[in-house]
Image (cartoon, helix red, strand yellow):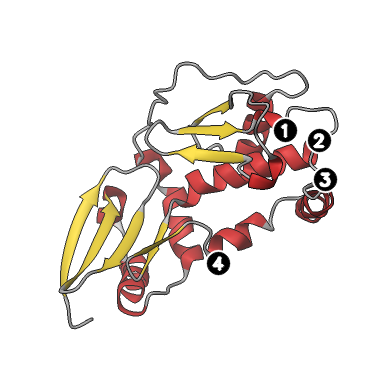
Amino acid sequence: MTGSSLCLTITDNTTSMLSVREKAENMEVRLHRMFLCAGPEICREIAQLIKKGRCNRQVLSSFIRQNKHLLKQKSPVNATTRVTGQYYCLQSIYESLNSEYFDKAISSAITWGRSNSRQRVRMRTLGSFNAGTNTIRINSVLDKKTVPAHFLEFVVYHEMLHVYLGIEIRNGRRSIHSKEFRLHEKKFRHYGKAMEWERRRFGSGL
C-alpha cells in the first residue's frame, strides 16, 4: 500500500490512541486495542492516514468516544495536587469543562503550579500536561482577581485538549498543536474573548 513494510503495535496508551511514524524502511503504527473491534469504515480511515497522512479525523474521534469505556483509567501519580487557589478553584473549572466539552472522558489530575515570583508571563507557560503523571498543571500567576474567569477556563480547556487528542505524529515529527487541535480550540465558548484578553494583557504582564 505504501511501498514500505508495516510495523504494528497494539497498546493500552490512554493519551494517544493512534499514531503513525514513517521511518527509513517501514511505517510504524501504534493503535490502542479498541481498534481491534473496528469495522470497515474505521479501517479505511486508518489506511488513508497511513498511506496519505490524512483522514477523516471526525470519524476516528467519534469511534474513540464511543469506545472510551475500553480505556484503562490511569490513576494520577502526583499526590500533592493543589486545586484551591486564592481566587479560583481549578477542580470546579475542570469538572465543568469535562462535562461540557469532553463528555466526562478525561480522568487526569489538575493542580496549581508552585508560586515563583521570578516567573514572567511573556514566557507563556501558562499550563502544561504531563502524560507520565497524567497531571495538568496551571501556572499560579493566573490565580489573580485581575484574570477573568473565561481566560483561566480557556487555559484549562487548552490543556485538557492535549489529554483528549494526544500528540499527532506526521512524517516522524510530533505535532503538539495540529490543525485539528486549533479547530477544537475554537470550539471553546469564549475563545474570541480569551484571545483578545491575551493579546491585550501579555504585553504589560498580569
Mark in front: 3 vs 2: 3
Marker disc for residue 204:
3
Q: Where residue 189 sits in the image (x, y, percent)?
A: 76, 50
Q: Where, by quadrant of the figure, is residue 74 drawn?
A: top left
Q: What residue type is labelled 1?
A: Leu
> Quadrant location of residue 115?
top right
Task: Please give the residue where the numbered disc 1 appears in the rendered image.
Answer: 142
Q: Which of marks 4 and 2 is nearer the N terminus?
A: 2
Which element carries disc 1, helix, strand or loop? helix
**Between marks 1 and 4 in the image, the one whose residue lies nearer the viewer:** 1
Q: Position of residue 23 (x, y in %)?
A: 22, 70
Which comes before the other along the chain, label 1 or label 4?
A: 1
Precedes in sequence: disc 2 or disc 1: 1
Which residue in the structure is indicated by mark 2?
147
- Residue 102 makes an appearance in the image: no
Instruction: Residue 31: name its quadrant.
Output: bottom left
Query: Is 66 rendered above or below residue 116?
Result: below
Camera-nearest residue between 189 and 68 = 189
Residue at coordinates 75% horizontally, 18% vertically from top-left? Answer: 86
